[in-house]
Amino acid sequence: GGEVDRTAWVTPEEARQRLTNPTDREPLEALVAAYERRILRTAPFLVLRHAKAKPRSSWSRAEGERPLAATGRRQALAVARLLAVWSPEKPVSSPWRRCVETVTPYVQHARKSLKTIAAFTEKSAKAKPKKTRRETRALLDRHRSTLLCTHRPVLPLVLEELTETVAGRDTEAILAALPTKDPYLKPGAVIVAHQALDRGGKIVSLEHYDVWDD
């Protein structure tokens, strides 16, 4: 609006001189501090719980084929808009239908290729939890913009790996922000863990968003 007449790139020192309002200097100082701590350059690691599915009680066929409910399909569209904020380059999902349907709108709109990993299904996580954790760790170790869509019963294993990746002076606050009780995330909700690329991929910041629900 009328408050901005031009923009310019300047050094932090010059910016401090130009910013006459003390409250305007606060975000500048936070930016400089993040740079000095080597946590400014990050890659987002997104953990997504699939959108609302048809109830188990009303589904008699294979569990892996249970689809999204009508509300879940609408949530999936909202999820796609939410994910576009971070534009994860590497979408990964449980191969079960309700997870794939949740990420499909984003994958199609962003023109990304979806990789499915069986270790993130409910059945596999229950039978081989260590493998699920290894697959999570492998994704985290890549230090790239990643989306992981999985199921509520799998979330504790994924969150355990996130917990072990947290580091820095804000560790306590970050760990406090991680959900610790069932159901961990609402259907369609997402956790965004920011991995500092200059700190070995350690998680230095965390965000949590619930998707639209009718």
Image: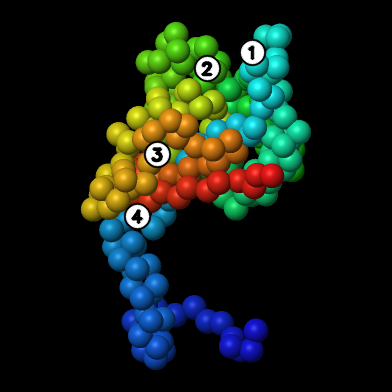
Q: Is residue 174 left or right of residue 88?
A: left
Mark 4 or mark 1: which comes first in sequence? Answer: 4
Q: Which residue sits at x=28%, y=58%?
A: 37
Query: In x, y percent, where is residue 125?
Result: 46, 16
Quadrant of the rendered structure where residue 41 is? bottom left
Q: Nearer the viewer, mark 4 or mark 1?
A: 1
Secondary structure beneath dot 2 equals: helix
Mark 3 or mark 1: which comes first in sequence? Answer: 1
Marks 2 and 4 sit apart, C-alpha to C-alpha, by 34 Å
Quadrant of the rendered structure where residue 103 is? top right
The vertical placement of 127 against 71, above or below, is above
The vertical placement of 74 against 4, above or below, is above
Give the residue at mark 1.
Answer: 63
Q: Nearer the viewer, mark 3 or mark 4?
A: 3
Mark 3 or mark 4: which comes first in sequence? Answer: 4
Query: In x, y percent, where is residue 1?
Result: 65, 84
What amino acid type is highlighted by mark number 4? Ile
Give the residue at mark 3.
Answer: 179
Task: Pick the quarter of the image with the C terminus.
Answer: top right
Q: Is residue 101 left or right of residue 46?
A: right
Can you tell which mark lies on residue 122? 2
